[in-house]
Amino acid sequence: MKGFFNILKLKEITLLKHLKALLDAPEVRRMNGKKWVVKTYSQWAQCLPEWNLWTIRRTIYKLEAKNIILSHSFNKKIYDFTKWYRLSKKGEELLK
């Protein structure tokens, strides 16, 4: 966790720790040998009720831009925009 607070803001840290907890849960999905959490922004809002949707979107975007979390869409239906999230190597190192 060295340098954790120098790189990230409180909301980013909160979401990152929440993602880590979800990835450690037994019901996590696996794709290409990696663990992924599948959530819409609305589902994130249910997990973090004190945050609004724009805060969640902005925080996820910032973590993606810093290459701390990775997102992808493995959905079979074209109209399904649900994102899949996992920690990048950089994100895993920050949480050590």
Image (cartoon, helix red, strand yellow):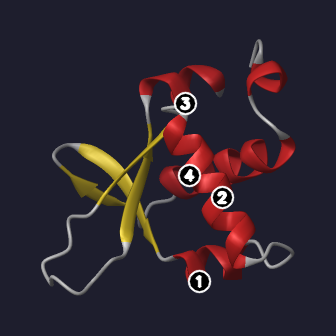
Three-letter residue code for mark 3: Gly
Three-letter residue code for mark 1: Ser
Given contact means CB atoms under 8 Å apart, are the residues at marks 3 and 4 in contact?
no
Q: Which residue was labeled with disc 2?
A: 58
Q: Which mark is residue 61?
A: 4
Secondary structure at badge 4 equals: helix
Q: Which residue was labeled with disc 3?
A: 91
Which is closer to the viewer, label 3 or label 2?
2
Mark 3 or 2, nearer chain start: 2
Examine the rendered structure and indicate whether residue 8 appears above or below residue 86.
above
Q: Residues within 10 Å of mark 3 (few under 14, many from 20)?
A: some
Residue beneath the point at 77% across and 77% down = 52
Secondary structure at badge 3 equals: helix
Mark 3 or 4, nearer chain start: 4
Q: Which residue was labeled with disc 1?
A: 42
**Residue 44 position in % (x across, y down):** 62, 73
Examine the rendered structure and indicate whether residue 82 appears above or below residue 28.
below
Three-letter residue code for mark 2: Arg
In front of the other: 4 or 23: 4
Q: Which mark is residue 78?
A: none
Q: Residues within 10 Å of mark 4 (few under 14, many from 20)?
A: some
